[in-house]
């Protein structure tokens, strides 16, 4: 919603800065008086939570980097030195490790919110695409970060995943092997690989920060979607970001931090794997190589396809398909709240992701493999079949007149202020 | 619609889920994973379990005694230093005791001005002495098997200290249908049930001086607790700080909820 | 729509006195500030020397093969330690200087109280006059003075000469001339036997 700024600097210093680099004005306009739908639920707090998690990961990461040694011989021991000798090292390391898991938890909830309420539909397609790009960068960053511990799981996860590229040999002979050796910096995963993963792991979060800024910029052009999926029509529909959503986001953030603290202080290794406390051994493969929980659904999809090459294609496609969602969904109605048939398929998709996650932790044989194939099929069918077809054939429920009206229906307590004409909405 | 009421139900669900989950799994070194074909490990009572868990000083001291008497002949703990034995949250030996315990070990130092390596008694600042100079020598002395370093062993196996206890007390006569490879021993807790390590503990092998009975079960219990401390020396500090922070966050959450409600009361 | 953020905070008809709403908002801000400070502290404290650096690293030095008039350099806590076995004339030269004439009259000896004067007795090894053990770092800007090797320039006072800015130290390691403000420091050390010392 492009509209003229109403910021008026009060102090003389304020005026001086405003004329040279108007950051206070920017903050006031974009995070102070910015108009927000008044009906947002707690699923809308995860954007703020994710921003906090990015800052937390960068802060803990930079200080960990002051002590970490990125060599094959020194890495594992340096992490243990951090845990034992560095002041607060245990806290910083556990916060960073648990933080990565919670970063993904928040990201998945945030993404599913977007899917459910149609936040990817016009005019927010680019916003959505930037979000999927952030998710992709997060996947790369987390994968590299986990490798830095140089435990057994770190080492073998890198070996397995980088080896996937050798599947290109079946397309162009020799290309895959050359590519893999280029990635490794050698003929096997080793010191050179670790060193470059470290450099890139340090770099990528700052790239993520840049894309996040684009993401927020793209959001602020149309403004936020809302649970009803209908446009803001008058001043009755909105409140200012501050103090309403600063306080609501703040409250949600404190609860999320409580979850974070509960894990860090009482179950810091719950989400990890014990094999990663065994120093990396290139001559011994662990009996079951499993990635961290947030990669398990993708791992299940990879192993469900019998062909190596097409398994890799499916893995890439499982995130890649998200880029096309704005065009796959043909429904004219944004929010699943008003889509009674589609809703079933959406929840089946959520269940599919959870089941695939469980299957990813199990060996890919017997019933696990059969179910893995069934749920992988549904995963792609949801995007490629359910989204386009249901948009055409479904008869949606009647949409409310306005956001304010949608609030009034549910509760007797709501008082709605007198409406001002839309032009006065600034 | 009052957005807070819609919030209470999922919040209640989250808390109802998180509290028993957290309590049940506190100090679980790793999630239960692929349980098929691997023996199930009995849960033990440990003083360090639970959100208020602490190490039993006397137990961890006895555990160190078991390690240094029996295990240290083959297993290194190279991530630990003798000074750790005196630090808070562990066995908490006195500074004098730490110096004496350290000096019992001979460590390699150098090169001196002549360019030679030499041995001297260990100091508190030294790392624990390793029984073998390198892996190859360790294998030669142990029939080709490499005794793993024990510094983080309590976190490196599913079941952690429960597993270590089960292993040390799990030596059995091989059943008739199991073919034992030459040099291996039958152990009910070890994956595959054949382990290269001969039973390290027998009743009476370590001379406890505090009246604790000198049984294999006690040795196993004590050394498992010691190994848990060795893997997580900051456990007590973590629990104590955690308690303070959770209380702070609970109060903060209440304040934020009231503040949010106060702000939103103007539009509800 | 409100013109200022302050206006958005007020309902119509609300007074400017502190209300219950203000109390809870101040409380929330207070919690946030405490939380932020508590979170910031570990991020800063982790840069302080860690436990392995703090655990007093000690070095034993064997003195048995140092000849009279000879000096050796050993490392302790990352710093060079000058150990010189002084000849009788060097000891006499150090003793002959009145402490009041010295640019720095204090002993700078970690084994003695801070206010001990810089007499040769307070600089040399306890009951072992020939031995001088000190941290070989010039107290001006941190260069390592020359004087340990036979061919080195030892300055006018027969001790050490710092080539960076010309400070000169005498045979007790005390600064006599030049920009250095203090005598070279004596580290904590003790004799384990006549031929062995433990530094730190």
Image (tube, rainbow, N blue to C red):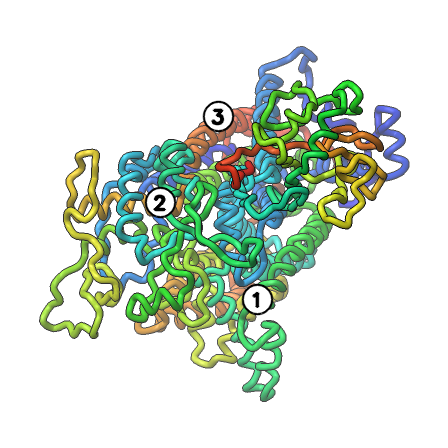
Callout 2 and callout 3 share a chain: yes
Q: Are marks 1 and 3 in contact (CB under 8 Å)?
A: no
Q: Dot 2 falls on which chain?
A: B
**Other residues around mark 3 within 10 Å, as few (<14) / some (14–19) / many (≥20):** some
Q: Name the residue under label 2.
A: B104
Mark 2, secondary structure of its residue: loop
Task: State the CA–CA distance, disc 1 to disc 3.
Answer: 47 Å
> Does residue C166 appear left or right of residue C43 in this picture?
right
**Rendered-image quadrant of the C terminus of chain A:** top right
**Are dots 2 and 3 in contact, CB under 8 Å?**
no
Question: Which chain is indicated by disc 3?
Answer: B
- The residue closer to the viewer here, C28 or A245, is C28
- Which residue is at 79% across, 28% downward? C181
Element assignment for label 1:
helix
Earlier sequence position, callout 2 versus callout 3: 2
Picture disc at residue A191: 1
Count of picture labels: 3
């Amino acid at each position: 919603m492009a509209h003229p700024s109403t910021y008026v600097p009060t102090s003389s210093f304020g005026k001086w800065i405003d004329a040279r680099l108007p950051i206070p004005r920017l903050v006031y306009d974009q995070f102070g008086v910015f108009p927000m739908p008044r009906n947002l639920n707690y699923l809308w707090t995860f954007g703020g939570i994710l921003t906090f998690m990015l800052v937390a990961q960068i802060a803990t990461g930079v200080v960990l980097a002051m002590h970490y040694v990125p060599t094959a011989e020194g890495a594992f021991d340096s992490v243990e030195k951090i845990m034992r000798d560095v002041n607060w090292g245990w806290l910083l390391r556990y916060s960073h490790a648990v933080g990565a898991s919670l970063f993904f938890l928040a990201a998945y909830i945030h993404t599913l919110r977007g899917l459910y309420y149609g936040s990817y539909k016009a005019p927010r397609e680019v916003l959505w695409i930037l979000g999927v790009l952030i998710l992709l960068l997060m996947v790369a960053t987390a994968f590299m970060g986990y490798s830095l511990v140089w435990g057994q799981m770190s080492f073998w996860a890198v070996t397995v995943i980088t080896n996937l590229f050798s599947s290109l040999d079946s397309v162009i002979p020799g290309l895959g092997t050359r590519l893999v050796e280029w990635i490794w910096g050698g003929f096997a995963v080793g010191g050179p690989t670790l060193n470059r993963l470290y450099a890139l792991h340090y770099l990528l979060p700052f790239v993520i920060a840049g894309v996040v800024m684009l993401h927020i910029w793209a959001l602020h052009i149309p403004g936020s979607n809302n649970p009803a999926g209908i446009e803001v029509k008058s001043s009755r529909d909105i409140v200012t970001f501050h103090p309403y959503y600063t306080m609501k986001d703040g409250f949600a953030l404190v609860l999320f931090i409580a979850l974070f603290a509960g894990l860090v202080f009482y179950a810091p290794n719950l989400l990890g794997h014990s094999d990663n406390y065994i120093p990396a051994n290139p001559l011994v493969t662990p009996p079951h190589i499993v990635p961290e929980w947030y990669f398990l659904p993708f791992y299940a999809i990879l192993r469900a396809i019998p062909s190596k090459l097409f398994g890799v294609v499916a893995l890439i496609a499982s995130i890649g398909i998200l880029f096309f969602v704005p065009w796959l969904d043909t429904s004219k109605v944004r929010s699943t709240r008003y889509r009674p048939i589609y809703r079933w398929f959406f929840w089946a998709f959520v269940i599919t992701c959870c089941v695939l996650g469980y299957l990813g932790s199990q060996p890919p044989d017997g019933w696990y493999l059969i179910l893995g194939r069934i749920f992988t099929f549904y995963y792609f069918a949801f995007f490629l079949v359910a989204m386009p077809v249901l948009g055409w054939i479904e008869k949606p429920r009647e949409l409310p007149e306005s956001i304010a009206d949608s609030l009034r229906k549910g509760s007797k307590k709501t008082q709605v202020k007198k409406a001002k004409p839309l032009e006065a909405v600034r | 619609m009052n957005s807070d009421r819609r919030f209470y139900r999922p919040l209640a669900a989250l808390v109802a889920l998180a509290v028993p989950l957290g309590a049940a799994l506190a100090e679980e070194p790793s999630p239960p994973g692929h349980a098929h074909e691997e023996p199930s490990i009995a849960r033990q009572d440990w003083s360090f379990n639970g959100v208020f868990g602490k190490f039993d000083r006397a137990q961890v001291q006895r555990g160190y005694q078991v390690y240094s008497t029996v295990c240290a002949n083959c297993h290194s703990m190279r991530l630990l230093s003798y000074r750790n034995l005196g630090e808070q949250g562990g066995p908490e030996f006195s500074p004098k005791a730490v110096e004496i315990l350290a000096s019992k070990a001979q460590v390699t130092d150098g090169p001196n001005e002549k360019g030679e390596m030499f041995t001297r008694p260990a100091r508190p600042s030294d790392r624990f002495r390793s029984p073998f100079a390198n892996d190859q020598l360790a294998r030669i002395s142990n029939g080709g098997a490499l005794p793993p370093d024990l510094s983080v062993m309590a976190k490196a196996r599913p079941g952690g200290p429960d597993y270590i206890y089960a292993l040390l007390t799990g030596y059995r006569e091989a059943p008739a249908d199991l073919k034992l490879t030459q040099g291996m021993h039958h152990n009910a807790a070890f994956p595959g049930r054949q382990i290269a390590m001969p039973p390290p503990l027998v009743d009476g092998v370590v001379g406890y001086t505090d009246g604790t009975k000198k049984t294999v079960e006690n040795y196993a219990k004590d050394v498992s607790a010691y190994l848990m401390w060795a893997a997580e020396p900051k456990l007590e500090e973590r629990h104590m700080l955690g308690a303070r922070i959770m209380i702070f966050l609970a109060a903060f959450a209440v304040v934020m909820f009231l503040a949010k409600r106060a702000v939103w009361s103007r539009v509800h | 729509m409100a013109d200022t953020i302050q206006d958005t905070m007020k309902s119509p008809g609300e007074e400017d006195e502190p209300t219950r709403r203000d109390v809870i908002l101040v409380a929330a801000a207070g919690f946030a500030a405490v939380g932020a400070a508590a979170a910031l502290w570990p991020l800063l404290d982790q840069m302080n020397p860690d436990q392995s650096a703090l655990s007093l690293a000690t070095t034993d030095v064997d003195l048995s093969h140092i000849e009279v008039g000879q000096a050796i350099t050993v490392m302790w806590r990352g710093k060079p330690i000058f150990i010189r076995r002084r000849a009788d004339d060097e000891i006499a030269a150090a003793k002959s200087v009145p402490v009041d004439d010295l640019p720095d009259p204090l002993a700078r000896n970690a084994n003695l109280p801070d206010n001990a004067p810089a007499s040769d007795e307070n600089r040399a090894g306890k009951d072992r006059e020939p031995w001088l053990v000190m941290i070989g770092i010039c107290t001006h800007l941190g260069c390592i003075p020359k004087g340990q090797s036979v061919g080195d320039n030892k300055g006018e006072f027969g001790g050490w000469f710092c080539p960076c800015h010309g400070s000169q130290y005498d045979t007790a390691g005390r600064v006599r001339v030049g920009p250095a403000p203090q005598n070279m420091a004596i580290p904590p050390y003790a004799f384990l036997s006549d031929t062995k010392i433990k530094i730190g």
